[in-house]
Amino acid sequence: MRPSPSSTAPSAPRAAGPRVSPGIAAGVADTAIVLAFAATGRASHGEADPVLGALSTAWPFAVGLALAWALPLVHRRPLSVWPAGVLAWLGAYVVGMLLRAATGQGTAVPFLIVAASVLGVALVGWRAVALGVRAALRRRAEH
């Protein structure tokens, strides 16, 4: 019996170890961004209790992020800039700010601007970078 052509053709090297699904990786990255946003903001203002304080700042944005992730448009294509990145950003920001207002947390205009900017750049931006890297790796593999 002759081996099939595909079994004798050289294959591209594979990464060792188990692969993490893109959805899990994207969810972890988004959550890490929200936590880092809250922790960095608290640290820049010299707030006490860095861990519990960061969690208390992050929870409204995390709830908004979770609601965005409940949308099929987000979890079907988690690495896409649109719709996943934009919806993750808008969910975290809009729901986060509504929950902050409803619970008496600060919603000063400078904070609204900073939060929109930082969350937008981070939640949409990492996806744009990831897609660029993937495209470059594909082009490289084709040559």
Image: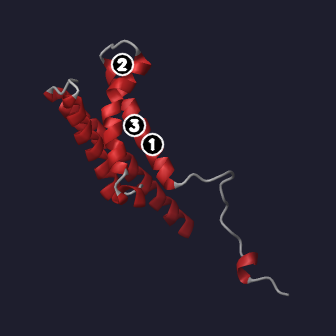
Residue 21 in the image, given as x and y percentages of width and height: 54, 54
Residue depicted at x 14% and y 29%: 109
| Residue where numbered disc 3 is placed | 33
Query: Disc 1 marks which amino acid?
Result: Ala
| Residue where numbered disc 2 is placed | 43
Residue depicted at x 39% and y 51%: 127
Check if mark 3's residue and mark 1's residue have beta carbons within 8 Å: yes
Q: Give left or right: position of 72 versus 117.
A: right
35 w.r.t. 2: above or below: above
User: How far apart are the two marked residues, 3 and 1, measured between alpha carbons?
Assistant: 6 Å
Query: Disc 3 marks which amino acid?
Result: Ile
90 w.r.t. 72: above or below: above
Point out the residue furthest to the front here: 102
Point out the residue furthest to the bottom here: 1
Neighbour tally class for label 3: few under 14, some 14-19, many 20 plus, Cα within 10 Å: some
On-image quarter of the N terminus? bottom right
User: How far apart are the two marked residues, 1 and 2, measured between alpha carbons?
Assistant: 21 Å
Q: Earlier in the sequence, mark 1 or mark 2?
A: 1
Residue depicted at x 47% and y 53%: 23
Residue depicted at x 37% and y 50%: 69
Residue 77 appears in the rendering: no
Q: Which mark is residue 29?
A: 1
Residue 133 in the image, given as x and y percentages of width and height: 46, 54
Quadrant in the rendering for residue 46? top left
Helix, strand, or loop for circle 3?
helix
Q: Earlier in the sequence, mark 3 or mark 2?
A: 3
Neighbour tally class for label 2: few under 14, some 14-19, many 20 plus, Cα within 10 Å: some
